[in-house]
Image (spheres, grey):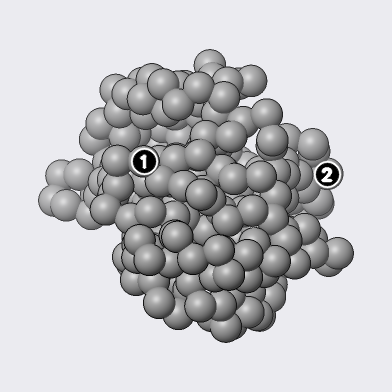
Amino acid sequence: MNYAPETLEGWYALHQIYRVPASLSADATARDGMSRALAELACPADGGWTAAASLVGSRADVMLVHFRPTLDDIGRVQRRLGTEVVIERSTLVYSFLSVTEAGLYHLSAQLAKEAEQRGGAVGDDAYRHALAQRSAAELASAHVQRRLYPQRLPEMPYVCFYPMSKRRQPGQNWYELSLEERSRLMTAHGMVGRRYAGRVVQVITGAIGLDAWEWGVTLFARDPLDFKKLVTDMRFDETSARYAEFGEFFVGRLAADGEWPA
């Protein structure tokens, strides 16, 4: 029997992508209202953040990115912005709801193997006890904390967002692979990303059950060319080359905290 990997989740995320009428871009009152709303939402006391990015080469103009501790918090952000004239009169081109995620492929494969060796089963009491202990250790690591609770990085102003899913085609069905094989592939996939440490910060958000695509990828960088280089390298990796489907890409530059892009 095959098994889903265990995961750790952090903040909920919402990406909202708008086409803004030129008349609103020239309306100082409307822009000031959005700037005040974004300043209010930029850094809430209970965690998360909101930022706006001006998009380049896109069918849309602006992308809003929100991270919040709960789904209800995301809903409150959505309703607050909905009161602004700019949002009321702009066209929502695309939105993506998800939650930050750390996939525990290697740990899941280890626990499944241990359960088999002791004659138990995935999900039994011993499995759940070991999972709780090892998940707590993972959650305590700085690396996992950065993945689940990503911080705003002013020194990395460029942003790239795209959704993706794993293929479910005959002969290329990710979900038919064994947990061990998926663990091997994802470990190798992660090594590609590590080559860009310090140049690109990658935030993976899970959307299964929340959106049509299965994951969202949000990249931050100092140099937008690093988006091209990283995604190219990833596509030659076996995991992406055989099993990944990519959606539309949205690329731009983040405005300063609390600012509506010019």
Q: Is residue 185 left or right of residue 194?
A: left
Element marked by disc 2: helix
Rendered location of residue 213, percent (x, y): 35, 60
Whether residue 34 is visible to the viewer of this picture, yes or no, is no
Residue 61 lies left or right of residue 192; in this view the side is left
Mark 1: amino acid: Val
Report how far apart the C-alphas of labels 1 and 2 lie in the structure. Answer: 38 Å
What is the tally of numbered marks visible in this picture? 2
Name the residue nearer the viewer: 174 or 91. Answer: 91
The location of residue 32, given as percent across then percent down, is 63, 65
Going from N to C along the chain, the mark reached first, 1 or 2, is 1
Residue at the disc numbered 1: 56
Which residue has dot 2 on it?
140
Which label lies toward us, 1 or 2?
1
At 46% across and 47% down in the image, what residue appears? 54
Q: Residue at x 72, y 44 (%)?
A: 151
Amino acid carrying label 2: it is Ala
Q: Is residue 237 above or below residue 1?
A: above
Residue at 69% x, 55% y is 258
Rendered location of residue 179, percent (x, y): 44, 45
Q: Quadrant of residue 155?
A: top right
The quadrant in which residue 25 appears is bottom left
Q: Is residue 25 visible?
A: yes
Secondary-structure class at tag 1: loop
Q: Residue at x 58, y 70 (%)?
A: 29
For label 1, the crowd category at 10 Å Cα-Cα, with few meaning under 14, some 14 to 19 and many 20 or more, is few
Check the picture and name the quadrant holding the N terminus: bottom left
Instruction: Please report contact status of discs 1 and 2: CB closer than 8 Å, yes or no.
Output: no
Residue 220 numbered mark, or none: none
Q: Residues within 10 Å of mark 2 (few under 14, many from 20)?
A: few
> Residue 168, image x and y in percent?
23, 54
